[in-house]
Amino acid sequence: MHPNQFYDWQKQFFENGVKAFEADEKRVETKLREQVAALEAKLQRKDSVLAELMDEHVTLKKTLGRSKSALGGGRPS
């Protein structure tokens, strides 16, 4: 190998070496964004299920409350 070739490669590396590492950073950033999106979707599904369960709970509680009062059996104070 000719020394000039080595110095040319070295010069190219020092001028453009940062670009070689930017690709890795972008991949990591993309992966993190995908993970955040997946976790946000999972959280939204949980919130939706929880809201549905709470609605059913309140409806059931109201229904049972009416049936007890109709029978004359309320809660003791």
Image (cartoon, rainbow, N blue to C red):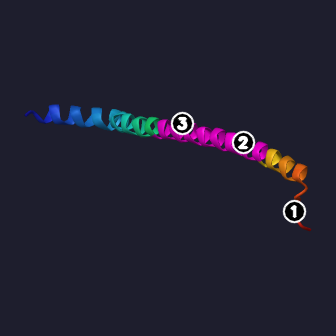
Q: Is residue 18 left or right of residue 39?
A: left
Q: Mark 2 points at which residue?
A: 56
| Mark 3, secondary structure of its residue | helix
Q: Are marks 1 and 2 in contact (CB under 8 Å)?
A: no
- Label 1 sits on what residue type? Arg
| Mark 1, secondary structure of its residue | loop
| Mark 2, secondary structure of its residue | helix
Q: Which of 67 and 28 is in front in this view?
A: 67
Q: Is residue 54 left or right of residue 31?
A: right
Mark 1 / mark 3, whichever is N-terminal: 3
Q: Give the range drawn in magenta.
A: 32-60
Q: Residue at x 86, y 47 (%)?
A: 66
Q: Which residue is drawn at 29% across and 36% down?
A: 13
Quadrant position of residue 18: top left
Q: Name the residue under label 1.
A: 75
- Label 3 sits on what residue type? Ala
Q: Mark 3 points at which residue?
A: 37
Q: Where is residue 69 in the image (x, y as percent from the top left)?
A: 89, 52
